[in-house]
Amino acid sequence: MRARLVIQRFITSVLTVVAVVTVVFFISRLRGDPTTLLVGDNASAEQIDQLRQQLGYDRPLVVQYLDYVGNALRGDLGTSLWQHQPAFNLVVDRLQATASLGALALALTIVIAVPCGVLAAVYRGTVVDRLVMSIALLGQTLPTFWIGIVFILVFAVNLQWFPASGTGSWKHFILPAVTLACFSIARIARLVRSSMLDVLHRDYIRTARAKGLSQPTVVNRHAFRNALIPIVTIIGIEAGQLLSGAIITETIFAWPGLGQLMIQAISNRDFPLVQAAAIVIASMFVFVNFAVDILYMFLDPRIRYA
Amino acid sequence: MTKNSIRNPEVASASAFPNCRISRRVLLEASALATVGASLFNASGNPAFAARGTGSSTLDTFTLAQDIDPETLNPTKVARTQSRNVYATMFDALIHRDPELVLQPALAESWGWVTDTSLELKLRSGVKFHDGSDFTGDDVKYTIEQAMLPESAHAGNLERISSIEVPDPLSVTITTSEADPLLIGRITDIIYIIPAAYHQEVGDEGFEQNPVGTGPFVFSEWVKGDHVTVTANPDYWDGPPAIQTVVIRSIPEATTRVSTVQSGGADLGIYVPVALVPPLQEDSSVELLIGSSPDAIYLGMAVTNEILADQRVRQAINHAIDVSAIATRLGGEDAVVIGGYILPGMIGYDPALEPYPYDPELARELLAEAGYADGFEVVFDVPDGRVPSPNDTAAIVASYLLEVGITANIQLHAFDEFADYLYQRNGKALTGLWYFHGKSSTLDPDDLVGASFHTGGRWNWGGVNNPDLDVMLDQAYAETDEEQRAALYTEIDQVIKEQAYYVPLYQLVAYYVVNPSDEWNWEPRPDELVFIADDVTVT
């Protein structure tokens, strides 16, 4: 029973990745091909045509697409037009930087948002609740780039506690990870709170209290465990987003990750690289969701026997 | 800190303006009057670079922050300024321009045209690549051939080369299919020499992993998207550099790049946007340097357009636009107003050539004379991106034109689509006004003027067809005597202004932010390049 669900989910995931690749392929060609951007200012029309033929951009779109898919299945995602190297390698190079930043941001999110959300729910209506919710509102409404720049000005330029940009040491991680996490922390805290509130009002919680169980036991063993299901789902989606490339944060902090690579590839009309990055990002996102779905199956007893 | 302080070199010193936060300025006019040597025969056996740190003083690390990463570490493929800054550390070109833009021997000790189409170069002996192999003419031939491959950004510049011979290991003869006097400028500081045997052995991929050149620094590591690190080459032919390690970082976001310099993460940051200049002037922990830029913004006019074909209309448009206001508003208070097409720093530049005076009344009169008393409508093509403030420039220009009755319909195009309009591809063409960002990588006026106004010139998008001007341009192009050549170009600039083929809006200014230090000095160059080994002097 469960096995069938797993296989079903897996097939859907693969189809999603294929759909992403197809859409990216055709949309990026809507505005023409990159040949003119690749040559110097002094190139003649003949040279441009020659290059276009050489790179295969003069063929019908569908032919280009099928050719691409055929190569992709063999692991060849093309050569970057901008950096003259295998696109797949370039993407994988940047993967670690993005994933490590995303992982730290995710850890911060879980460690900060979940307890805050629980506390806000349990002490609903009090100062704690209002404080958490106000900060959460700020975290969701302040633009990431603004937060990032302010952090740089305060902590890097004025206080000189952390470096303003780049990678190299653990200190380089802090500002970008916190900037990236702000939005997630805010969102997850609010969702945890509402999920907890939803559970705290259930009959079985009233029963538990009536049984004389202490507040911590009620909250931790009964309420939280049940609230966990939607929380895990949401964190799973958040994880997918964090791990797949925080474009704004990476650009602000000059973090050499996938998000930055994607932006530069797009502005350089580097089709192979844009596609390769899209495939990898989509795959990561889909895989994380897939893992969350599987986890969900174990967490929610109702699904077990579906 | 008025604009006058730039025009009068004598008063632009720091002591004249004790409250001036900008404590160091490049004297734009002074450097402008330096000649761009296009000498026929430059014979000199001695290297003539700017002083490197001599004696015992060395600098541990120097960090440069630019906005983008090099696309590749193979210099035969690309030509962007930021990439060239990196290549200059690990490679050498045949000829190098010093900070006064005078050609100096680098890997070529001497060079000259023996016939109209045959360029001979004598190479420096005893130079070794980082892997120990000897530098010979074969490497020059191989490098140029690589740079002529269709996917290389240099291919267009080297189009007229028909063959390269290596009569002996230290000589190279380049033959062109037709006279190409600008070839020297086109290989200077752009064609960086790579080792033939090594590249053939390891291929493009291997070369990326470990590039080898003859340069003052040896490749150490490249963390893509983050930085390139190079270390001093103790066996460099011009003496070991005074800096031990150089790190070139790429930080795309301008505020972050500036913050990185402010927080000590970099020594020199380039491409500081105009908007950040006022707060930096207030910040006493960093120094703001100003240099001229070989870039300028122009408003092009298509003479193929019936209405614009009338000289009076074009002159009216010139009078209708207040270029000083535009220059200050868009280029910052240090932007240079230009009256002609030729920029300061190029031969033929005439500082006395003023722009058309701002006179909307006169503009209306001229239009009426030409038969357009009620004004007219015209298309205004503008590229969207990759150029300085296109939207603002277009909007401001259009509003000035509206004042005199001309309705300019702004059409924004993505950059590559705009290229189609420029080069008349895919059925598109320029039919009215357009925004033009002129960049000259060789700093020779023919690159700008000849290309833009000669009939059939590769940048002649306006369809200018003036036989008298063609004669003057041909003459100037072939003229070998420098002074004569300068005089001819000055004359040409005046004719172009009279014909009002375009409106010069302003010349860009390059801002740099520096973490001041007692240990080193650096002055901006007019071509915006940063040659760390040559121009960062260690004190």
Image (spheres, coloured by chain):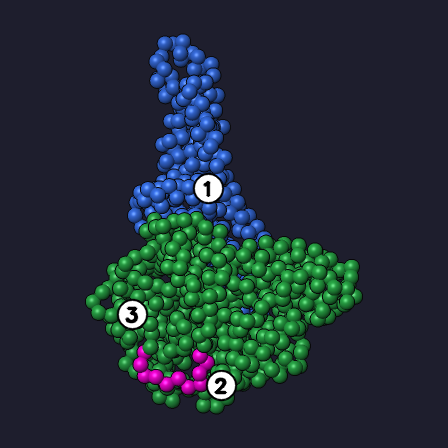
Q: Residue at x 37, y 85 (%)?
A: B43
Numbered disc 1: secondary structure: helix
Tint of chain B: green
Q: Residue at x 52, y 58 (%)?
A: B331
In the rendered image, residues at marks 1 and 2 fall on the same chain:
no
Q: Residues within 10 Å of mark 2 (few under 14, many from 20)?
A: few
Q: Is residue B404 above or below residue A246?
A: below
Q: Chain of mark 1?
A: A
Q: Residue B268: which quarter of the image?
A: bottom left
The nearer-to-camera label among 3 and 2 is 2
Give coordinates of residue A192: x percent, y percent: 44, 27
Q: Residue B383: which quarter of the image?
A: bottom right
Q: Is residue A134 visible?
A: yes
Q: Is residue B177 visible?
A: no
What secondary structure prevails in the magenta region? loop
Q: Residue at x 49, y 28 (%)?
A: A306
Toward the viewer: B46 or A148?
A: B46
- Mark 3 or mark 2: whose residue is earlier in sequence: 3
Name the residue tied to disc 3: B52
Q: Which stretch is magenta?
A: B37-47
Q: Residues within 10 Å of mark 1 (few under 14, many from 20)?
A: few
Toward the viewer: A171 or A58?
A: A171
Q: Is residue B321 left or right of residue A181?
A: right
Name the residue tied to disc 1: A146
The residue most toward the left is B56
Name the residue tied to disc 2: B481
Q: Which mark is residue B10?
A: none
Q: Residue A101: which quarter of the image?
A: top left
Toward the viewer: A125 or B8?
A: B8
Q: CA distance from mark 3 to mark 2?
A: 33 Å
Tint of chain A: blue
